Every structure is written in structure tokens, then in C-alpha cells.
Image (tube, rainbow, N blue to C red):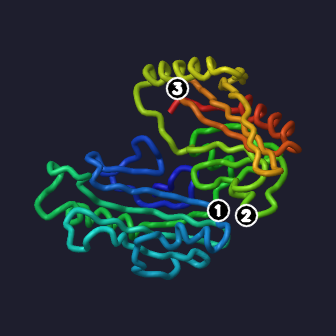
Amino acid sequence: MYFVPGGRIGFQRPATITPQTNSWHLLSPDHTLQVEVREALRIDADWDDRMLAPARHALIASGFLSPGIEHRHFRDQRFDEHDADYAANTHVFRDDHWIGQIRISTSTLGSQFLSIPGGQIARWRDVTDALIASLAVRPSPSASEALAELRVYLTLDDLNPRLVGNQLILSIVPPATPLEASGVNGSYILLSQLSLLPLGSPEKLEQTTNAAFALYQGTPGSRVIAGSDCRGVVLRENRRADGDEVTFSTKVMAFGRTRQLEISSHYSLGDRDRILQALERVVLSLSLPDG
């Protein structure tokens, strides 16, 4: 069973599809079959509908995958149902606190060279049917377990961690609302795009990482902090005024030997000192082992 690293949705992964640059986005070698996963925390009905009722999709079936896990199946109406190549089906799951979807699609990417007798839908039908039949949702892993699957290690003490899809949100106080839990409101630290995979040889990746570090290090107003396993470039703080409300943001580009990660923080004036101290602790504790 392939559970997307750090996530809850899983399936029997066919040997013909693999993650290439993102562990939540799997592709066949010719990219004519794609499997994409998204997950989020629930906020409210309007927010849920972006995933629970995808635009331009027809509801095919609804029910329950298991007790407590609602399941809906949608088909993308942008593709002619008689088209032999293009099809996209989305399966959406949710419980009281979480919502996720998996999109399975076939295409020729607009290339005449990928058109085959019978079409791509027929070519991949057995594979997609088996994949859909195997769909599963596991209990939420702890933040440390999810990060370990994503090969990201850091100290989470007193930072109220929560995984929102493939990103980690930290805060100095527990979130009081669903919007704060999801990093829409409040002061927080965000580690984004944790499912991205480095692409290239270790030697090339190290060269690329060193070049990126040097580039950010030369940014005006930046400073360098270094932990035992990673080094980070803290970029200049940004200030934003919206009427009487003033908020701030600071971004850190963190670098291991062959991997890099963007860490951003968003905060009010009252939380500024504590958030910046927590941000530095996160970077100093961070480890990004080679893939």
C-alpha cells in the first residue's frame, strides 16, 4: 500500500506509475497516466466545497468508504465522454476534521505521438480500476511520524504542529479556530511543499544547493544562521499595513547538503519576538538528509 508520505490517502501503487519530482503526484513514464493527491484541514462548508464539489465536475456516486469517512466520486465534465484519451476522475474523502482528494487522469498531453489504437483510457483501464478499488484512508499520523516519512526532521517542542496537506504549520499558542489551524489567520510558521523530491545526481544536487545558498546569502538585508545539520539564510523582514492592522513576515531558505526548504513566518507586532525566536529554533534543529 502506498500512502502518500505524510498524508492519509493510500492505494496499491501500480508498478507503472511513480513519483518523480513530488511524492504526492505520480506519473507513468510517458505521463499519460497521472495520480494527484491533495489534503487539507476542514474549515467550513464553503471552504470544503472547493474540494468536496470540484468545479465543472459531475457527481457520479456518494457514500462511505468506512464508518466516519465520507466518499464522493466526481468525473470531470470538460472532457467528452466519448473521447478515447482524455478522462479525469476525482475521489473525495472527509471526516469531521480532514478532507482529501485523489485525481486519476489519462491524456496524450496534446501529443499526436502518444495517440494509440483504442486510446489511453482503454490502455490504462485495468490499472485505474485496480487503483480505485484499493483506495484507503488511514488514521492521521502524528506530526513527527508524518515528517519522518517526508524525510524532514526538526524539534517540535511547544510549537503546536499540524499537517495541512503537504505542509507543516507551527504556532506559539494552540490555534483557536479552524482558520488559525490551517494558517489562514493568526501568527504562525509555515514549512511548505514538503512532498517535493530533489531531482538529479547527488553531486549535481550539492552543486545546485550550494549555488542557491550563495545566491540567497548575497541578498541585501539577509543573514546566515547555521545548525548542526542545516544552514539557513534569513531574508529581510516584510511589513504590511492593512488599515490599522500591521502584520509582518520573514522567510528563511534552509539548506541541507542536497536539499533545500522554504520556511516562512507570518505574525503580528505583539507576537513578533516570540515567532522570530521560534523560527530560529526551527532552523537550528532542522535536518534534511539526502534522498
Residue type for callout 1:
Leu
- For image coordinates 29% across by 60% down, the residue present is 106
Residue 172 in percent (x, y) is at 83, 47
Helix, strand or loop at disc 1? strand
Q: Which is in the foreground here, disc 2 or disc 3?
A: 2
Looking at the picture, tell me which residue is in the foreground, 79 or 243.
Answer: 243
- For image coordinates 58% across by 66% down, the residue present is 99
Residue type for callout 2:
Pro
Label ID, residue 41: 1
Residue 182 located left or right of residue 54: right
Calculate the distance from the C-alpha at mark 2 to the C-alpha at mark 1: 8 Å
Instruction: Single out the residue that lies furthest toward the left.
Output: 117
- For image coordinates 70% across by 49% down, the residue present is 169
- Quarter location, residue 223: top right
Label ID, residue 258: 3
Residue 199 located left or right of residue 40: left
Helix, strand or loop at disc 2? helix
Helix, strand or loop at disc 3? loop
Looking at the picture, tell me which residue is in the foreground, 239 or 204.
Answer: 239
Residue 231 in percent (x, y) is at 66, 23
